[in-house]
Image (cartoon, helix red, strand yellow):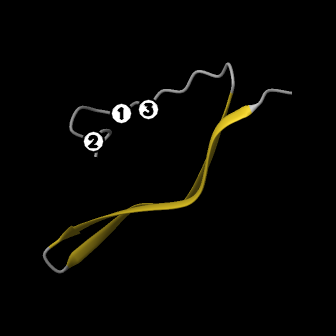
């Protein structure tokens, strides 16, 4: 069994613009084990680096 090197639980990301709130994700959990390769992909301008 591989050792977990990164673990996050219950993450939430929102974006506020004026009176509007957009929930990007809610209650996100992520575990990355030693030796795994992880990539974040999406269209240009989709907010990958935000």
Give the residue displayed 65% in from the left and 22% down from the top: 36
Category of crowding for the residue at label 1, using alpha-carbon neighbours closer than 10 angstroms: few (below 14), some (14–19), many (at least 20): few
Q: Mark 3 or 2 closer to N-term?
A: 3
- Give the number of the mark in front: 3 or 1: 3
The quadrant holding residue 20 is bottom left
Q: Residue at x 23, y 32 (%)?
A: 44
Task: Please state the horizontal and vertical placement of residue 33, each as a whole percent of the image.
Answer: 69, 30
Screen quadrant of the N terminus: top right
Q: CA distance from mark 1 to mark 2?
A: 6 Å
Number of other residues with Cα within 10 Å of mark 3, as a class: few under 14, some 14 to 19, many 20 or more: few
Mark 3–mark 1 CB contact (< 8 Å): yes
| Helix, strand or loop status at disc 1 | loop
Q: Position of residue 50 (x, y in %)?
A: 28, 46
* Label 3 sits on residue: 40
**Quarter assignment of residue 2:** top right
Residue furthest left in the image: 18
Q: Secondary structure under badge 2?
A: loop
In which quarter of the view is residue 19 placed?
Answer: bottom left
Question: Is the Cβ of the residue at disc 1 closer than 8 Å to that at disc 2?
Answer: yes
The picture places residue 10, in percent across and down from the top left corner, at: 58, 62
Residue beneath label 1, please? 42
Indicate the secondary structure of the residue bearing disc 3.
loop
The nearer-to-camera label among 3 and 2 is 3
Q: CA distance from mark 3 to mark 1?
A: 7 Å
Q: Which residue is mark 2?
A: 46
Tag on residue 16?
none
């Amino acid at each position: 069994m591989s050792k977990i090197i990164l673990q996050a639980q219950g993450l939430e990301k929102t974006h506020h613009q004026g009176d509007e709130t957009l929930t990007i994700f809610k209650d996100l959990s992520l575990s990355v084990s030693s030796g795994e390769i992880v990539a974040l992909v999406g269209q240009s301008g989709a907010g990958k680096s935000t």
